[in-house]
């Protein structure tokens, strides 16, 4: 397995700033160890995505006398990580039934937790076998494998992504909403620009705002955000994103919204005039489907808002975005329950097939996804399209070898700093200055 290895020295400095767990060679605390028999399973999450899947597939398989306690903290302003980090630092001194048992991590900061003792060996300590893990997409294990080759977390999802477009707007602008015909019209950035102009001329926005296609560029970076000598590195893909976004803003091709904002979400509604968004399967289910509904309490069916008026294609370039991993916390006393959670959600072919059909997830199981891709599965939000088939080959090619523990900070700060430039509030030079300042305030060990 190709391991994603990062410098122990760099990790120590960053962890001191972000987590408070110092140095790779001398942690503030050593391993606590894991045990079984606990009566409370404490699970740290930032939203309800994992909870919904847990309740649908795992809850009934756990012992009746084990209580599940959900600790939910929003990821906004790093609140989730701050609360989690504080709990992990106090883990050894916390009574067992109040300790962290399971916690989730995202791709942008997964490496923050991989090379330290707060996470445990999925194989040796949890008990998952190579045979159980054999069907997973390789990159999902690469991300969570530490510098000693130890797997520290597993995921139920893989996250190849693409372009999600509004069928009715595509018909108006391109004369068709058929993904097989629309896809070739949007398979290069030059073609994308041409369609953006046509959409604008008919009163539509190609994108809702500045950040919609950021991941399509950033995931195609050939170099990491930080060099080995701790210099901040700007890959050409980031420069291209900045140039495109400034052009689209000045020409009115986007609606000047920030991703996740009410303005961005409004573009997904019945009256929205946004041609497309970029994202993986989880973005469709967790963000777009709910925002599309005119009657939030009504059924998820075509005709309720813009639900059903969307379709999926590859877009100008393949990319992936995000991903959530399940980690077992060192010090847990619910090792048997954690094993059940990981086995059911991340290793069971039947469960992972049903996850795809019920939630639209692209799950972390190669044969399961190939079976769904070749089935009569239809995603109703996407107008009955089987979008899984678009993802299958792309998922096999995902490469996270450039991932670093700085990715979250870099992605957030570059988007925030450049927004002022797009709006004409600062020059490009000033925006770059603000970016470097913002990054080094968080990571003082880095330099321009």
Image: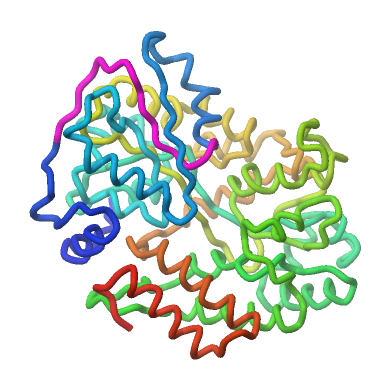
Say which of 198 and 51 sits in front. Answer: 51
Against 364, residue 279 (above or below) is below
The residue that appears at 17% across and 61% down in the rendered structure is: 8
Question: How far across and down, in percent of the image, does residue 344 sit?
Answer: 43, 25
Question: How far across and down, in percent of the image, does residue 347 sit?
Answer: 41, 30
Which region of the structure is painted magenta?
Answer: 32-48
The residue that appears at 39% across and 46% down in the rendered structure is: 105
Question: How far across and down, in percent of the image, does residue 381 sit?
Answer: 75, 42
Q: In which quarter of the image is the C terminus?
A: bottom left
The residue that appears at 22% across and 43% down in the rendered structure is: 89
Would residue 7 be found to the left or right of residue 375 on screen? Answer: left
The residue that appears at 22% across and 54% down in the rendered structure is: 20
Say which of 262 and 414 sits in front. Answer: 262
- As drawn, the residue found furthest toward the top would be 64
Against 372, residue 284 (above or below) is below
Say which of 152 and 296 sits in front. Answer: 296
């Amino acid at each position: 397995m190709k391991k994603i290895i990062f410098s122990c020295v760099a990790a120590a400095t960053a962890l001191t700033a972000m987590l408070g767990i110092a140095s790779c060679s001398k942690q503030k605390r050593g391993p606590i160890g894991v045990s079984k028999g606990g009566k409370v399973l404490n699970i740290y999450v930032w939203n309800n995505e994992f909870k919904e899947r847990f309740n649908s597939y795992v809850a009934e398989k756990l012992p009746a006398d084990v209580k599940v306690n959900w600790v939910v903290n929003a990821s906004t302003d790093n609140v989730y990580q701050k609360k989690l980090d504080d709990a992990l630092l106090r883990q050894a001194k916390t009574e067992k039934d109040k300790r962290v048992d399971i916690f989730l991590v995202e791709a942008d900061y997964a490496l923050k937790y991989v090379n330290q003792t707060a996470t445990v060996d999925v194989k040796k300590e949890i008990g998952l076998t190579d045979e159980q893990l054999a069907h997973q997409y390789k990159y999902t294990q690469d991300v969570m494998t530490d510098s000693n080759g130890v797997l520290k977390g597993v995921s139920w999802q893989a996250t190849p992504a693409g372009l999600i477009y509004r069928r009715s707007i595509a018909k108006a602008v391109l004369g068709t909403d058929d993904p097989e015909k629309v896809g070739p019209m949007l398979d290069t950035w030059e073609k994308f620009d041409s369609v953006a102009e046509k959409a604008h001329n008919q009163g539509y926005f190609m994108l809702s705002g500045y950040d919609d296609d950021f991941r399509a560029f950033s995931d195609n970076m050939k170099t990491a955000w930080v060099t080995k000598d701790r210099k901040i590195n700007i890959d050409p893909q980031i420069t291209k994103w900045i140039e495109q976004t400034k052009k689209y803003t000045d020409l009115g091709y986007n609606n000047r919204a920030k991703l996740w904002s009410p303005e961005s979400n409004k573009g997904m509604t019945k009256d929205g005039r946004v041609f497309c968004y970029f994202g993986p399967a989880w973005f469709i289910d967790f963000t777009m489907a709910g925002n599309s509904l005119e009657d939030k309490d009504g059924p998820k069916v075509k005709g309720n808002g813009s639900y059903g008026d969307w379709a999926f294609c590859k877009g100008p370039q393949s990319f992936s975005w995000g991903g959530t991993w399940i980690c077992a916390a060192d010090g847990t006393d619910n090792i048997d329950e954690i094993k059940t959670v990981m086995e059911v959600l991340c290793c069971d072919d039947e469960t992972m097939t049903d996850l795809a059909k019920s939630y639209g997830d692209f799950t972390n199981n190669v044969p399961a996804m190939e079976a769904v891709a070749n089935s009569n599965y239809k995603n109703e939000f996407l107008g009955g399209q089987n979008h899984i088939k678009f993802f299958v080959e792309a998922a096999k090619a995902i490469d996270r070898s450039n991932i670093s523990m700085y990715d979250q900070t870099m992605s957030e700060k570059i988007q925030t700093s450049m927004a002022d430039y797009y709006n004409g509030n600062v020059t490009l030079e000033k925006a770059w200055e603000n970016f470097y300042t913002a990054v080094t305030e968080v990571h003082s060990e880095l330099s321009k």
